[in-house]
Image (cartoon, rainbow, N blue to C red):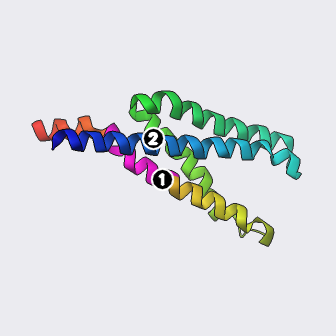
Amino acid sequence: MAAQTQETRSDNFTTSWVVLLIVSGLASLNHMMLPLDGDPFALGVIAVGYSLFAILVLAIPFRRGERWAWYASWIQVVGFASLIFSRIPAPEMRPVVAAYTIGAIVMALCLMLTAPVFFRREAQAKQAG
């Protein structure tokens, strides 16, 4: 039974990690289109850099199980969700705000599913002590 639980956690982690990478990758592609939509070029460059940094953190330290990477990954969730609170969007921006909100929810759920991998050692230490 213990082996099955460990395998399930591994599957949950891998699936969530892949979803996080896909959402970050799609965000990066989307942000590359910002200058084409009339937004300032600098905004596009900043947004692409933001998304590429998230991909880099997810691809290396997050995959290794480094706890700081789990915390750092929440920055992208907060950034996506902040559009909800920034201002009342113009009607033509509502689909964009909805897409970022859905992205934030999906990323938050994935991060919650991966949490046991990052906090397992702490929980085991408390049980042993």
Q: Position of residue 80 (x, y in %)?
A: 61, 53
Label disc, if present, on residue 108 of the rendered structure: 1
Specify whether residue 84 is in view: yes
Q: Look at the image and tell me in which quarter the N terminus lies.
A: top left
Span of residues in magenta: 107-118
Label disc, if present, on residue 4 of the rendered structure: none
Label 1 packing within 10 angstroms: few (<14), some (14-19), many (20+)? some
Magenta portion: prevailing SS class: helix
Front tag of 1 and 2: 1
Q: Position of residue 128 (x, y in %)?
A: 10, 36
| Residue appearing at x 61%, y 43% in the figure | 24
CB under 8 Å between discs 1 and 2: no
Q: Determine whether the residue tagged by mark 1 lies in a helix, strand or loop.
A: helix
Tell me which corner region of the image, top left, top right, bottom left or bottom right, holds residue 90: bottom right
Q: Which residue is mark 2?
A: 71
| Residue appearing at x 65%, y 60% in the figure | 99
Q: Determine whether the residue tagged by mark 2 lies in a helix, strand or loop.
A: helix
For residue 109, side relative to residue 99 (left or right): left
For badge 2, the amino acid type reads: Tyr
| Residue appearing at x 25%, y 39% in the figure | 6
Q: Position of residue 42 (x, y in %)?
A: 82, 40
Magenta stretch encompasses residue 30: no
Q: Look at the image and tell me in which quarter the C terminus lies.
A: top left
| Residue appearing at x 13%, y 41% in the figure | 127
Magenta stretch encompasses residue 110: yes
For badge 1, the amino acid type reads: Ala
